[in-house]
Image (cartoon, rainbow, N blue to C red):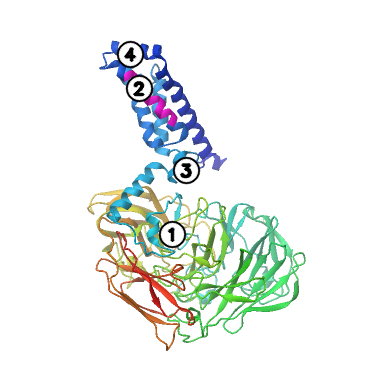
């Protein structure tokens, strides 16, 4: 009942709005049809003459024509936001020109059509309309999008040499989704529950995410969360508290790197273990937190497990996490969950060939040999794609690779480059994850992103569009992978970018704050690194941070990334929340509130807010009301939209130096663009498959050590600023 009475709860919203629109339109068609009745037109002409209207016959025809045309268009949902105005104007003339303006009695009937017209103007024509078919989003929004794009590109045509994942395609591609998201995912992450891991400071932590679709909803499980999340739309996640391990297990790792899979009408879960006594849990109502044991103990155990149910009903298990041993796989009896035969070796890293598999921040195998972990299996087009994480969770280059075979247990052949790779940007890493399909069968990949400041295992979750190209190559689009992206609302081609085109407006721009704790300086909040942060001296109400964009800009979204400074919690906490007020100003003196979350009751450590109507402002201020624990600290106050200037002109010279000494590595250099704050380097083993992307800030060189030593490579680059993206440089070859 509480949900039913909630003003945000919508009952059959799209069909209901379609019904209101169609009935309104048909009423107008009925009235407008009088244009074909000479007697009616004569009566209206006489009435208008008596009221001393000029050109009464012409006005009579115009009024009826307006009703007829508006009625037809509104019924069809065609140009709805434009065509309601002839209806509204005609009805206002009837109420206040021909009538007495008595909207409570005599003139109430035509005035109701005015109100219905306004409802359709503010809400749009909706999903069941020709506007949706033709424009993909409400008509007025489409017109604004095209207008801003035209102004932003200054009428230039995107570079025709762009390759398979061109971010410039967002200027051409029709984006239909109204929901967006921004990595890292805004989940109410639990705090690290392991005391020995928090000696440098208590902090939130998770990793190794799995998302599966079950009964047309999404379920997300992740390491050490003491529960899981569900969502209907991949945007609004709801936490379900649940501890799966038993008292005799005596471990902190409550479902570390969990395996999750659907079998028939049942969702099953199993956590990592080196022991023989972990149960497999099953549920047909996970949203209701109803679980029971499928088996009491899975005797063979396995760290970083994954289960895969093939089309023929046969079940397989994969596991492994080691810098010495490979991933393993075995067929399982789907009724008893006992292995059929013994485990077989699936794949061991080949870092002698694939540079990205080398351990270390600089991919040089310093300190340790690389780890392989986090298996996941996806079947597509009759082939089996075994995914794995490497080379280490704390590295910027933490990625998911993929090997491809004709059977679930191999043999497998490696794809040269990682499936998901994100070594640059605000938050880095895209390893140890899972691939799933949304309600429209589009593929997505969810993986681990790293912070690793207070502990190696301080991490978050991220999600990116993925898929398979026409040649069966599995890809994941991480370009602009921590900028706002469109969520799914229908079948989509993920080779086209889902990036919204909303640029970062405040990179290294001036910041003022209410106070500062020690060396946690203000500009850490705008340096595009989740590893650094500003902290206020307290966590009190009234502490604030203010960002100056330098000029009036169009703001579409803001991401608020909280940092953990002097936190007091261990383990997952419930009934904690962030509260704040977002205000904007044109001059830094007169402020207006654009987002009031002073009564928010949700835990939002990476809150992401969008504005249905873009905000125009120069200054943005975030004022603290309450934080869950510790100080008011921000690792990223990230403001997205469009500036008023021109995008960068583009890189003029671009070279890749690859030598025979080590063909896994290359030095990439380019002539800097004076108006760019960052660059995207795209690369791949085919000129039409530049599926990997590296974002670089404040530099014009990059030491890249991630290549397959036995393949030719192709590269291009684009420049980025707050106004947009440059054309790409022509694709060049590195032998």
Whichever of callouts 4 and 1 sits on the residue coming sooner in the sequence is 4
Whichever of callouts 2 and 4 sits on the residue coming sooner in the sequence is 4
Q: Which residue is mark 1?
A: 497
**Pointer 4: residues within 10 angstroms few (<14), some, or many (20+)?**
many
Q: Which residue is mark 3?
A: 133
Whichever of callouts 2 and 3 sits on the residue coming sooner in the sequence is 2
Alpha-carbon distance for marks 3 and 4? 40 Å
Whichever of callouts 1 and 2 sits on the residue coming sooner in the sequence is 2
Name the residue: 76% across, 73% down.
340
Q: Tell me where residue 520 sits by quadrant.
A: bottom left
**Pointer 2: residues within 10 angstroms few (<14), some, or many (20+)?**
many
**SS category of the residue bearing label 3:** helix
Instruction: Decide if residue 253 is in sight here.
Output: no
Task: Please give the label number shown on residue 662.
Answer: none
Q: Which residue is mark 4?
A: 45
Alpha-carbon distance for marks 1 and 2? 46 Å
**SS category of the residue bearing label 2:** helix
């Amino acid at each position: 009942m509480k949900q039913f009475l909630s003003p945000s709860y919508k009952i059959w919203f799209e069909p209901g709005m379609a019904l209101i629109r169609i009935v309104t339109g048909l009423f107008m068609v009925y009235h407008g049809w009088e244009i074909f009745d000479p007697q009616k037109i004569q009566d209206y002409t006489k009435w208008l003459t008596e009221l001393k209207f000029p050109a009464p016959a012409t006005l009579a025809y115009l009024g009826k024509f307006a009703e007829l045309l508006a009625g037809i268009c509104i019924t069809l949902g065609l140009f709805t936001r434009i065509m309601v105005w002839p209806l509204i104007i005609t009805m206002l003339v009837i109420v206040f020109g021909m009538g007495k303006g008595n909207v409570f009695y005599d003139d109430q009937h035509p005035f109701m059509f005015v109100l219905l017209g306004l409802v359709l103007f503010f809400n749009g024509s909706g999903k069941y309309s020709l506007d949706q078919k033709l424009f993909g989003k409400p008509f007025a929004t489409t017109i604004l999008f095209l207008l801003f794009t035209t102004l932003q590109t200054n009428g230039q045509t995107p570079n025709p040499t762009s390759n398979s994942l061109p971010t410039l395609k967002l200027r051409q591609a029709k984006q239909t989704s109204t929901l967006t998201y921004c990595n890292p995912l805004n989940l109410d992450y639990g705090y690290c529950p392991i005391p020995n891991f928090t000696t440098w400071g208590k902090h939130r932590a998770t990793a190794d995410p799995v998302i599966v679709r079950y009964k047309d909803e999404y379920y997300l499980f992740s390491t050490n969360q003491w529960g899981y999340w569900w969502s209907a739309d991949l945007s609004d996640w709801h936490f379900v508290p649940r501890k799966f391990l038993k008292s005799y297990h005596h471990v902190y790792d409550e479902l570390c790197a969990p395996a999750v899979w659907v079998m028939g009408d049942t969702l099953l879960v199993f956590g990592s273990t080196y022991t023989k006594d972990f149960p497999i849990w099953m549920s047909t109502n996970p949203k209701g937190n109803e679980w029971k044991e499928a088996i009491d103990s899975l005797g063979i155990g396995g760290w970083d497990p994954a289960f895969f149910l093939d089309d023929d009903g046969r079940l397989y298990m994969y596991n492994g996490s080691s810098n010495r041993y490979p991933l393993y796989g075995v067929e399982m009896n789907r009724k008893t969950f006992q292995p059929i035969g013994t485990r077989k070796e699936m794949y061991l890293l080949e870092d002698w060939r694939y540079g990205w598999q080398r351990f270390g921040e600089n991919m040089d195998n310093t300190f340790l040999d690389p780890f392989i972990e986090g298996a996941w299996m996806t079947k597509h087009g009759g082939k089996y794609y075994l995914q794995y994480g490497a080379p280490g969770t704390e590295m910027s280059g933490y990625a998911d690779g993929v090997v491809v075979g004709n059977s679930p247990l191999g043999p497998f052949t490696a794809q040269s480059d990682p499936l998901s790779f994100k070594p640059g940007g605000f938050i880095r890493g895209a390893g140890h994850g899972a691939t799933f399909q949304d309600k429209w069968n589009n593929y997505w990949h969810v993986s681990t992103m790293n912070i690793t400041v207070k502990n190696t295992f301080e991490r978050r979750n991220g999600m990116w569009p993925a898929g398979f190209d026409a040649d069966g190559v599995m890809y994941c689009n991480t370009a602009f992978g921590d900028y706002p992206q469109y969520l799914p609302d229908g079948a989509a081609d993920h080779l086209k970018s889902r990036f919204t085109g909303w640029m970062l407006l405040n990179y290294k721009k001036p910041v003022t704050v209410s106070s500062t704790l020690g060396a946690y300086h203000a500009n850490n909040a705008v340096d595009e690194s989740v590893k650094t942060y500003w902290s206020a001296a307290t966590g009190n109400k009234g502490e604030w941070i203010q960002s100056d964009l330098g000029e009036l800009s169009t703001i579409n979204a803001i991401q608020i990334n909280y940092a953990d400074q002097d936190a007091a919690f261990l383990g997952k906490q419930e009934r904690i929340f962030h509260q704040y007020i977002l205000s904007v100003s044109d001059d830094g003196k007169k402020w207006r509130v654009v987002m009031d979350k002073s009564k928010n009751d949700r835990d939002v450590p990476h809150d992401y807010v969008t504005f249905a109507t873009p905000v125009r402002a120069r200054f943005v201020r975030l004022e603290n009301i309450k934080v869950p624990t510790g100080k008011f600290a921000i690792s990223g106050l990230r403001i997205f939209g469009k500036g008023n200037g021109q995008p960068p002109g583009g890189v003029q010279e671009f070279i890749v130096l690859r030598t025979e000494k080590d063909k896994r590595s290359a030095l990439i250099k380019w002539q800097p663009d004076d108006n760019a704050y960052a660059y995207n380097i795209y690369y791949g083993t085919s000129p039409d498959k530049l599926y990997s992307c590296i974002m670089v800030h404040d530099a014009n060189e990059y030491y890249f050590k991630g290549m397959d030593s036995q393949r030719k490579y192709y590269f291009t680059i684009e420049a980025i600023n707050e106004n947009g993206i440059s054309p790409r440089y022509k694709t060049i070859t590195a032998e």
